[in-house]
Amino acid sequence: MAIHSKNKAQMCKVFPSSLGPIAMRWFDEIEEGSISSYKELTRAFGARFVTCSRVPKPLDSLLSMAMREGETLKNYFDKYWELYKEIFGDFEDVAIRTFNVGLPTQSDLWKSLTMKPPRNMHKLMDHIEEHKRVKDDQSQGKGKAKIFSPN
């Protein structure tokens, strides 16, 4: 990084090569176009890592997560995703399987994920988004056809 200290644009390009696996996961999720300068990039990085000094969580943290009664799917998924991003190591396959374990067994999403487990975390996120869209459409009376089995 010191070699490119005068060229801020180049520093933005080189920055990811200095990151470890947890920080790289954070970096990969930065929304395109949301950061317009190296100063903003370092500020966002500092807010996430330097000031918090987060320690990677153990894998078994995911195993203890479960959706609480009355909790929304969005809230459960958001908490699950945040915890997953803090785990050190490549445990995507375990993370996908344990997400389903925390769902109520009578839920449509649990049934759908059990019948057709997603192959990766992005497929899981897509499946959850599709499930939320169908539920939103049903609650607004827009969709008559059900993609998932009824409760």
Image: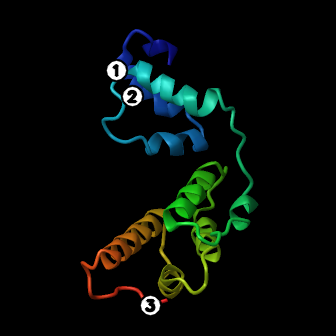
Q: Compared with residue 1, is residue 56 higher up or lower down, i.e. above or below? A: below
Quarter of the image where one finds residue 22 = top right
Would residue 86 appear left or right of 40 to someone viewing this image?
A: right
Residue at image coords 54%, 60%: 75
Mark 2 and mark 3 residues within 8 Å of each other at the beta carbon: no
Q: Residue furthest top?
A: 6
Which residue type carries mark 1? Ala
- Tag 3 residue: 150
Quarter of the image where one finds residue 46 = top right
What x and y, as percent, mark residue 89? 65, 53
- Tag 2 residue: 13
Q: Nearer the viewer, residue 28 or 62?
A: 62
Mark whose residue sits in front, 2 or 3: 3
- Pointer 1 local density, CA inside 10 Å: few below 14, some 14–19, many at least 20: few
Q: Compared with residue 118, is residue 125 higher up or lower down, i.e. above or below? A: above
- Tag 1 residue: 9
What x and y, as percent, mark residue 106? 57, 87
Q: CA distance from mark 1 to mark 3?
A: 52 Å
Q: Nearer the viewer, residue 92 or 147?
A: 147
Residue at image coords 60%, 73%: 97
| Colour scheme of the rendered structure | rainbow
Q: Compared with residue 68, is residue 28 higher up or lower down, i.e. above or below? A: above
Mark 2 or 3, nearer chain start? 2
Which residue type carries mark 2? Lys
Which residue type carries mark 3? Pro
Mark 1 or 3, nearer chain start? 1
Q: Secondary structure at mark 3?
A: loop
Residue at image coords 38%, 76%: 135
Q: CA distance from mark 1 to mark 2?
A: 7 Å
Mark 1 and mark 2 residues within 8 Å of each other at the beta carbon: yes
- Pointer 2 local density, CA inside 10 Å: few below 14, some 14–19, many at least 20: few
Q: Secondary structure at mark 2?
A: helix
